[in-house]
Amino acid sequence: MVEVTAWERMRGWSADLLRRRTGEGVEEWNRRIAGTGIATEDELRAWLAGRGVTGYAQMLLVMERFGYPDFLTADASALVERQYADRPALRPVYDKVVTLAAALDGVEVAARKTYVTLSTPRRKFAVLKATTKTRVDLGLRLDGVEPAGRLESAKVLRDDALTVRIPLRFPEDVDEEVAGWLARAAGLNR
C-alpha cells in the first residue's frame, strides 16, 4: 500500500517555517492576530507582510484565522477518491503511476484537491492529474527536455514548474518508458 499524504504534512512544514523565520510558533501568532481586531483577509495579509510573514507561513496564519477550506481538512484517500469518482476507468492508471513513484527512493506522494504531487525532499518533480474523463496527465519537471515523441507540452496543466507531460489513457500506457521518465525527473530534482 502506497502512503499518500494530504495537507497535514504541509501544515507542519509551514508551521516549522514560521517558527524558523520569526522565532514564534502558530499559537503565539494566533494570539497576536486575535488581539489586532483585524476583520478581513486582505488586512491580515498586509499586517503579516509588515512583520515579515509571507508565503506559506502567511497562508497558514490566514487559514488559522479565517478557516481552512474543506479540501485541506480531507484525508488523502478522500481527495483521490473525489478526483476519480466520475472517471473510475482512470483509477488503475493513477494507481500504477503512484506505485512506480513510491518505489523511487525518497519520493513523497501528496494528494491535493484536483491532482497529486510527487516530490523529492528538494521539490516537486511531477504531478498526476485526471485532466479529462478519458485521460490522466503525468506532468514532469524535466528542465532542458523539449516535447517530442510521447512527451507533450505541459501548458495544459497550468504549472510553470512542469516542462512536459505524458498523456495516459489506459494502465498499459504506464510502461517502461514512463517509468524511465519518472525516474529521470525524480533524479534531476534531488
Image (spheres, grey):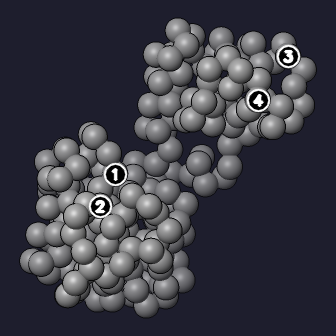
As drawn, which residue projects farthest toward the top?
23
Residue 91 as seen in the image, left or right of residue 101: right
The residue identified by callout 2 is 141
Q: Which residue is mark 4?
A: 46
Q: How many other residues sit within 10 Å of disc 2, few (<14), some (14-19) or many (≥20)?
A: many
Judge the density around disc 3: few (<14), some (14-19), many (≥20) Cα neighbours within 10 Å: few
Residue at numbered disc 3: 36
Of callouts 1 and 2, which one flags the residue occurring earlier in the amino acid sequence?
Answer: 1
Mark 3 vs mark 4, foreground winner is 4
Circles 1 and 2 in contact, beta carbons < 8 Å: yes
Q: Earlier in the sequence, mark 2 or mark 3?
A: 3
Q: Secondary structure at mark 4?
A: helix
Q: Nearer the viewer, mark 2 or mark 3?
A: 2
| Quadrant of the image occupied by residue 60 | top right
What percent of the width, then of the height, locates residue 32?
A: 75, 13
Indicate the quadrant where residue 47 lies. top right
- The reply to whether callout 4 and callout 2 are in contact (CB within 8 Å) is no
Residue type, mark 2 in image: Arg
Q: Secondary structure at mark 1?
A: strand
Vertical arrangement, residue 182 with respect to residue 108, above or below: below
* Residue wearing tag 1: 124
Horizontally, residue 108 falls left or right of residue 6, namely left
Q: Is residue 170 above or below residue 23?
A: below
At x 39%, y 58%, the residue is 161
Residues at marks 3 and 4, CA–CA distance in whole angstroms: 12 Å
Q: Are marks 2 and 3 in contact (CB under 8 Å)?
A: no
